[in-house]
Image: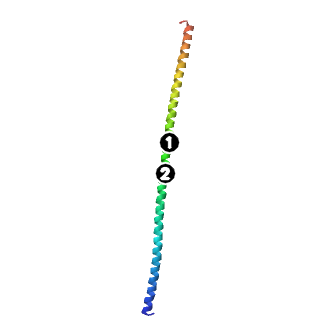
Amino acid sequence: MDHGEHIASLEAKVEAHDELFRLTHHELTRLHDGLDKLREHTDRGLADLREHTHRGLAELRDHTDRGFAELRQSIEELRREQAKMNRWLIGIALTYGTALLGIMLRLAGLL
């Protein structure tokens, strides 16, 4: 093999390596583009998930607050009913107690 053939062989190898480099560079560019798209998609998905979570938590907070408000209102209604019932029971106890005391005093001959 003479010097010219050796140079031609080396040039062919360089061209083959250049072509391989171009293909590799093209594939790397495609991979970077795909990675950028994946990042954008992931960011959008996470933003949507964050928004959905915040909205769900706000709805849950509102529902819980309404539930506690209704519970407080029910407790107040029960307390009012209990106070009314206690007044009735005290009134009945005083009425019957006074009547029994009057009967006992009459039987004892003090009235």
- The answer to which of 7 and 103 lies nearer the viewer is 7
Q: Position of residue 92 (x, y in %)?
A: 55, 19
The residue that disc 2 covers is 53
> Badge 1, how many Cα within 10 Å: few under 14, some, many 20+?
few
Check the picture and name the quadrant holding the N terminus.
bottom left
Please tell me which residue is depicted at 56% across the width and 8% down the height of the picture.
106
> Badge 2, how many Cα within 10 Å: few under 14, some, many 20+?
few
Q: Where on the picture, by quarter, is residue 103?
A: top right
**Circle 1: residue type:** Thr
Kindly report the distance in space between the C-alpha atoms of the residues bearing marks 1 and 2.
Answer: 16 Å
Please tell me which residue is depicted at 48% across the width and 46% down the height of the picture.
58
**Circle 2: residue type:** Thr
- Residue 102 falls left or right of residue 29: right
Say what secondary structure mark 2 lies in: helix
Q: Position of residue 91 (x, y in %)?
A: 53, 19
Say what secondary structure mark 1 lies in: helix
Q: Position of residue 81 (x, y in %)?
A: 53, 28
The residue that disc 1 covers is 64
Q: Which mark is residue 85?
A: none
- The answer to which of 100 and 5 lies nearer the viewer is 5
